[in-house]
Image (cartoon, rainbow, N blue to C red):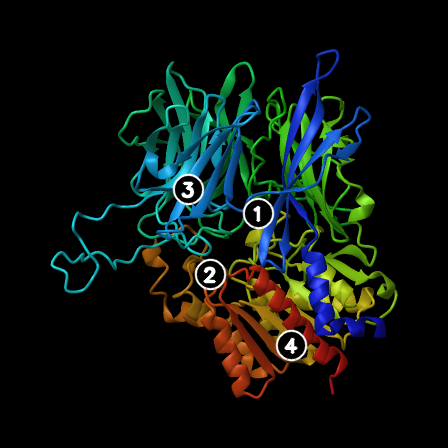
């Protein structure tokens, strides 16, 4: 262990964080193909890829582009040097034929200090034009949030964008006190879409003809419109536009990380000359008001254009904030819905009930923008399974899901183009790489040959070994707790080295066997890591997710406790060298178990924006329904009025399942890392815990950052790592 001890010096910690932050991750890939000599299929010619890394010197995320030439024997050669992408570019889209590209550039006017937005249009040779967004509508702003907004470009240079239109002030109205025309509405509260979306209040869709620079607004009162798409128009000289509408009334609930909000599928048929007035779209599906719809995708045929059907992910609104999805198909001509894949399937236990099958409901946030095979018969997507995230092909006609073999523990489908698919892949001990595979040449979609774009050996982290584990959950029948145990390679067969125990947030999320910078850093410090997927995690089935509702603070804590006992008994972990670490609900878990099981005598506890008191959080979080659902088990979709004014018994239960109910028994030294701008779990939660520990004489530190719930700003993450490492070092090496 002496070789690792020196790595806790501050200078070495800084160098270590910078080293791993500079490892690039691919974010996008675009394939350029040519017809083969016989004209029967396409062969890849060039692959343009976007990558990004976190620069700790400039304190920003740097994006760059690399281009690869694909040789006749399918080797990939770098062409030139990586080219840094302008940080001004916030959105980007390509036409279906690949001949045109549009980007959104944002900057601040040096004189006025006001933000400016410009749409730049390119063909294969040059920039065709630049359009000032304010020239289209001086009250309009294109929303740039990657989690909320997107561009869609068709071959005729029609562009769809998610926008917000500012309400114009009445003429002459002013905000200054004493003004004769004082604006009484200037300080009225406007509710946003919550955590990470605090500047977005109401969104519409803009249809922009880039040739004529004319704009038509698609607007619906009471709904925020997102995820626009084109579909086949039933009328000549008309453009058909669909989108998803999020219900705003009577009150918005936090949207990010929550796929249980009420939403609808809408459509419009718009004259191709683009009328001046706003268009109100029609609600086509979801009028029952109890569904969440997302990720609409329409097949495009190079000859016949857009299809008249859209596939999308559908979940029940209300209940768990992350859950399995149905794959639905809606026909705009017949206005009929067809279920391609349901989410009622229960994942089978196999091998004497020691592990789960690869087949179950879908668990994914979104599908790739281009996800169809050339013939439109299959959709390729990725989905969480227990411990892994794997690629699948969906047979739309037969309504079947087929597992595709993949060389890494984590897969994300990025692009399907002319029957070639590009995927991002990584593993616990392998940094992200890109993989290319051909569907047309495969007689078996389940057994594709994946070609790595970059040498896999250059991605390997030889100091890390890992293995998955599973054992029966004590609080449920026929359910397994799953996890991943990671060790520095040289400590794998030794009980040396402390073990960091981590449960994910959510609680309905998953720790998959992909690359995590935090895990790699722990291994470099000589630390073992236990990642735990307790019952209630995603990736198994809907029953597994819902089993935790109303039982947080008890059953999930039992699963963490039993996982600790499992790795002590089976994975060379020293019971006297345990460290707790977790964020959000993971922070809830580590602060809960430190109070419920003080006999485990943990070395240290690190909690990032933890839920400490569910009862008080119910009044201040952007997702009050979370507290009702998770603590009280009230999982039905309810009017907002029924989420507040809970009974004394319900509020008491929220308190009893919380870490604060056990704080008097806590003795473990605890580090709190809090975000001052956190709307999901406001930092008053962690600050209260810190104050109580301090008053009781328990060793504790509290660091507060100008950041949101994820604490993902580069300088914040940098400081968190340094302080976490130094805090752990104190109790690993200097514990009295």
Q: In the displayed orientation, state which residue is furthest to the top.
A: 38
Q: Residue at x 55, y 74 (%)?
A: 703
State the residue position of label 3: 117
Question: Which callout, 2 or 4, points at the residue further toward the start of the chain?
Answer: 4
Q: 538 or 65: nearer the eye?
A: 65
- The dot on residue 462 is none
Left or right: residue 230 compared with residue 457: left
Q: Residue at x 50, y 45 (%)?
A: 88
Image coordinates for residue 580, horizontal then vertical, percent: 66, 70
Question: Which callout, 2 or 3, points at the residue further toward the start of the chain?
Answer: 3
The answer to whether marks 3 and 1 mark residues whose Cβ atoms lie closer than 8 Å is no
**Nearest-to-viewer mark from 2 and 3:** 3
Secondary structure beneath label 3: strand
The answer to whether marks 1 and 4 mark residues whose Cβ atoms lie closer than 8 Å is no
State the residue position of label 4: 597
Left or right: residue 244 compared with residue 53: left
Question: Which callout, 3 or 4, points at the residue further toward the start of the chain?
Answer: 3
State the residue position of label 1: 542
Left or right: residue 61 compared with residue 523: left
What is the spatial separation of the Cα atoms under label 1 and label 2, in whole angstroms?
A: 24 Å
- The dot on residue 680 is 2
* Corner quadrant of residue 644: bottom left
Image coordinates for residue 428, horizontal then vertical, percent: 74, 53
What is the spatial separation of the Cα atoms under label 2 and label 3, in whole angstroms?
A: 30 Å
Q: 83 or 550: nearer the eye?
A: 83
Image coordinates for residue 625, horizontal then vertical, percent: 42, 57
Q: Residues within 10 Å of mark 1 (few under 14, many from 20)?
A: many
What is the spatial separation of the Cα atoms under label 3 and label 4, in whole angstroms?
A: 55 Å
């Amino acid at each position: 262990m002496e070789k690792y001890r020196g790595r806790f010096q501050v200078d070495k910690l800084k160098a270590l964080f910078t080293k791993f932050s500079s490892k690039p991750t691919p974010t996008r890939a675009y394939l350029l193909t040519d017809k083969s000599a016989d004209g029967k299929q396409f062969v890849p010619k060039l692959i343009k890829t976007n990558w990004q890394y976190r620069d700790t010197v400039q304190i920003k995320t740097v994006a760059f582009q690399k281009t690869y030439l694909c040789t006749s024997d399918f080797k990939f050669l770098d062409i030139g040097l990586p080219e840094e992408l302008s940080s001004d570019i916030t959105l980007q889209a390509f036409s279906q034929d690949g001949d045109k590209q549009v980007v959104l550039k944002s900057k601040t006017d040096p004189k006025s200090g006001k933000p400016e937005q410009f749409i730049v249009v390119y063909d294969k040779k040059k920039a065709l034009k630049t359009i000032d967004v304010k020239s289209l509508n001086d009250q309009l702003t294109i929303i740039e949030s990657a989690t909320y907004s997107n561009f869609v470009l068709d071959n005729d240079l029609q562009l769809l964008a998610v926008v917000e239109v500012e309400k114009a002030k009445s003429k002459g109205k002013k905000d200054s006190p004493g003004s004769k025309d004082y604006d009484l509405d200037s300080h009225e509260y406007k509710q946003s879409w919550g955590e990470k979306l605090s500047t977005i209040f109401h969104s519409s869709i803009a249809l922009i003809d880039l040739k004529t620079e004319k704009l038509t607004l698609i607007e619906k009162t009471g709904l925020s419109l997102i995820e626009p798409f084109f579909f086949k128009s039933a009328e000549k000289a008309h453009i058909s536009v669909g989108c998803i509408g999020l219900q705003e009334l009577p009150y918005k609930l936090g949207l990010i990380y929550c796929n249980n909000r009420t939403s609808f599928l809408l459509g419009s048929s718009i004259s191709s000359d683009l009328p001046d007035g706003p268009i109100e779209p029609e609600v086509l599906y979801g009028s029952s008001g109890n569904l969440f719809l997302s990720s609409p995708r329409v097949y495009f045929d190079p000859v016949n254009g857009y299809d008249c059907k859209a596939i999308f992910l559908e979940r029940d609104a209300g209940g768990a904030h992350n859950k399995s999805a149905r794959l639905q198909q809606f026909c705009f001509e017949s206005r009929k819905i067809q279920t391609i894949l349901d989410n009622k399937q229960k994942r089978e236990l196999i091998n004497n009930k020691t592990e789960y099958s690869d087949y179950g409901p879908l668990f994914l946030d979104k599908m790739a923008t281009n996800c169809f095979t050339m013939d439109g018969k299959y959709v390729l997507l990725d989905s969480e399974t227990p411990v892994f995230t794997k690629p699948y092909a969906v047979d739309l006609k037969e309504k079947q899901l087929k597992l595709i073999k993949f060389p890494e523990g984590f897969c994300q489908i990025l692009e399907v183009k002319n029957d070639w698919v590009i995927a991002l892949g990584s593993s616990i001990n392998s940094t992200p790489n890109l993989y290319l595979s051909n569907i047309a040449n495969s007689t078996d979609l389940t057994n594709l040959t994946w070609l790595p774009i970059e040498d896999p050996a250059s991605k390997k982290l030889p100091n890390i070994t890992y293995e998955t584990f599973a054992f029966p959950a004590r609080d449920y029948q026929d359910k397994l707790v799953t996890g991943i145990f990671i060790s520095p390679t040289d400590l794998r067969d030794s009980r040396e080295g402390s073990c960091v125990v981590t449960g994910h947030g959510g609680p309905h999320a998953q720790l998959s066997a992909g690359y995590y910078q935090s895990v790699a850093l722990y291994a470099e410090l000589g630390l073992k890591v236990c990642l735990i997927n307790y019952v209630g995690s995603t990736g198994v089935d809907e029953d597994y997710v819902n089993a935790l509702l109303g039982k947080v603070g008890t059953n999930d804590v039992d699963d963490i406790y039993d996982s600790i006992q499992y790795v002590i008994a089976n994975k060379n972990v020293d019971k006297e060298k345990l460290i707790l670490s977790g964020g959000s609900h993971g922070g809830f878990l580590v602060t809960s178990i430190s109070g419920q099981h003080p006999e485990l005598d943990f070395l240290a506890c690190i909690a990032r924006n933890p839920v400490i008191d569910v009862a008080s959080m119910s009044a201040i979080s952007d997702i009050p329904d979370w507290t009702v659902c998770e603590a009280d088990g009230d999982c039905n979709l309810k009017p907002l009025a029924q989420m507040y004014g809970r009974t004394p018994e319900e509020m008491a239960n929220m308190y009893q399942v919380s870490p604060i109910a056990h704080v008097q028994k806590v003795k473990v030294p605890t580090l709190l890392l809090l975000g001052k701008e956190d709307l999901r779990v406001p930092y008053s939660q962690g600050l209260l815990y810190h104050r109580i520990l301090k008053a009781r004489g328990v060793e504790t530190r509290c660091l507060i950052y100008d950041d949101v719930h994820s604490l993902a700003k580069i300088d914040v993450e940098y400081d968190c790592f340094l302080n976490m490492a130094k805090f752990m070092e104190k109790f690993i090496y200097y514990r009295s």
